[in-house]
Amino acid sequence: MNCRCCVFFIFVFALTSWSQTTRPKARQEAEYYVFAYSQHYRVPVPLVRAVVERESNWRPCAVSPKGAVGLMQLMPMTARNLHVSDRCNIGENVSGGVRYLAWLIRKFHGDLRMASAAYYAGENIVSRRGLAYRNPEVVAYVSRMRVTYLRFAQEKTEISETIEKRDIR
């Protein structure tokens, strides 16, 4: 094998190794913040995980066609209202998204369906129309959220087990 081939294989190996190690670290960091902020703001962890998966598929700086950014897809105005200055920052984005979810859950008296619909479509339209809001796109979103929420509710995350082991209250 000539030298160029060796260099190429080393480069490909290094690149694939690097990409495999950085993704799990970002996911681990995201899971940590999801768990921590969910506990702090008393929002079900499976709900926050479902929002992150549905909104960004765990991509820290995902950008939607409508301008939402980050793991929890915060719109510019929502981010400003929540004092999130860098929507691509995992900790800031999750903190803001979970605070917004907690507020929506309180606003809709614990109804996670309504909170999910409002997270997706905006709280004003969902507040005005309530359960009479039958936009097919929103109904489908809430249905997919339910399935994802139930899947996450059945599994226990590694990060929550690690944090529970460290918790010495």
Image (cartoon, helix red, strand yellow):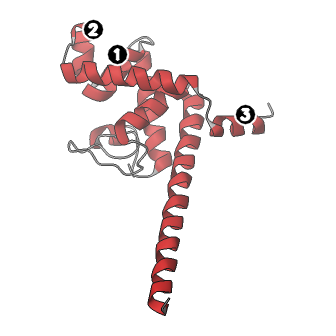
Q: Is residue 110 above or below residue 92?
A: above
**One can see residue 123 in this view:** no
Image location (x, y in percent) of residue 108: 38, 13
> Could you say where residue 156 lies in the image, as x and y percent from the top left?
62, 30
Q: CA distance from mark 3 to mark 1?
A: 30 Å
User: Disc 1 designates what residue?
Assistant: 114
| SS for callout 2 | helix
Farthest residue toward the bottom? 3
> In the image, is residue 113 above or below residue 83?
above
| Residue count near mark 2 (Cα–Cα under 10 Å), binned few <14, some 14–19, many ≥20 | few
Q: Is residue 111 visible?
A: yes
Q: Secondary structure at mark 1?
A: helix
Near-viewer residue (30 or 124)? 30
Task: Determine whether 14 is above or below 150 in the image.
Answer: below
Q: Amino acid at mark 2?
A: Leu
Q: Which mark is residue 131?
A: 2
Circle number at residue 73: none
Q: Earlier in the sequence, mark 1 or mark 2?
A: 1
Q: Residue at x 71, y 40 (%)?
A: 162
Mark 3: which amino acid? Glu
Outermost residue to the front:
1
Disc nearer the start of the sequence (3/1)? 1
| Image-based side of 75 in relation to 162, left or right | left
Q: Earlier in the sequence, mark 3 or mark 2?
A: 2
- Residue highlighted by disc 3: 164
User: Label 3 vs label 2: CA separation?
Assistant: 37 Å
| Image marks 1 and 2: residues in contact by CB distance under 8 Å | yes
Q: Residue at x 41, y 22 (%)?
A: 147
